[in-house]
Image: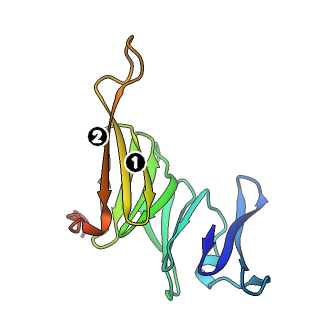
Amino acid sequence: MFWQGNLLWQVNDIPHQKNHLVAFSLATHAFVPLPAALAGITMLTSLDATPNLLAWTDEKTVWLWRAGDAKSQMLYQVPFVDHADFIRIAGDLVTWDAVDGPVAVDLRTSALVRLTNYYGGRLTAGSMVLVVEPVGPLKSASGPPMLRASVIDAAKLPPAPSCRG
């Protein structure tokens, strides 16, 4: 991915067990050191970035690093029977796919929000989120379910209410 004038990618040290990030400067055509919080990542399965945020998951924990912070922060610990994958950032939302549909954490309040009632998906671009969810039965003799699509500008959303202390 492109991030802060660099190409950023993961290198698999031991497939499915250990990896790390590397950054390559597009200006100098040389590898550049990563901030300590990013250099210390040893397992990730999905990654997304904005100029000031980097979010990733190892499928069981969702992490966030803000440019300038010494440490990353854990956003969400995934329950045992679930997973987090295909992480994306849209404005103040960090979104990912869970077992039964997409979810998000609002960075302003740390609130966890389900984006669909059941199953479905989402795509992001900048602060925009396209949410798609089935309406009606998931399986029927007449074919695949009907889908409802909604476009949300995360930058215009009020902060999500938080239940966390």
Report the side of 120 relative to 51 (left or right). left
- Residue drawn where x is 79% and y is 83% of the image: 30
> How far separated are the C-alphas under marks 1 and 2?
9 Å
In which quadrant will I find the N terminus?
bottom right
Q: How many marks?
A: 2
Q: Where residue 90 appears, x then y in whole percent?
A: 40, 64
Amino acid type, callout 2: Asn
Q: Quadrant of residue 57?
A: bottom right
Q: Position of residue 65 (x, y in %)?
A: 50, 76
Q: Is residue 108 above or below residue 71?
A: above
Q: Residue, x 42% and y 58% (percent of image)?
A: 95
> Against 123, is 11 above or below?
below
Residue 12, horizontal then vertical, whole percent = 76, 60
Residue 133 vertical placement versus 86 (above, below): above
Q: Which residue is mark 2?
A: 117
Q: Is residue 78 visible?
A: no
| Residue 159, quarter of picture | bottom left
Helix, strand or loop status at disc 2: loop
Q: Is the residue marked by circle 2 packed among few (<14), some (14-19), or many (20+) residues within 10 Å? A: few
Q: Residue at x 30, y 56 (%)?
A: 152
Q: Nearer the viewer, residue 43 or 138?
A: 138
Query: Residue at 39% across / 10% down in the picture?
Result: 141
Q: Would you say 116 lies left or right of 74 here? A: left
Q: Quadrant of the C terminus?
A: bottom left
Please name the residue that numbered disc 1 is placed on.
102
| Comes first in the chain, label 1 or label 2 | 1
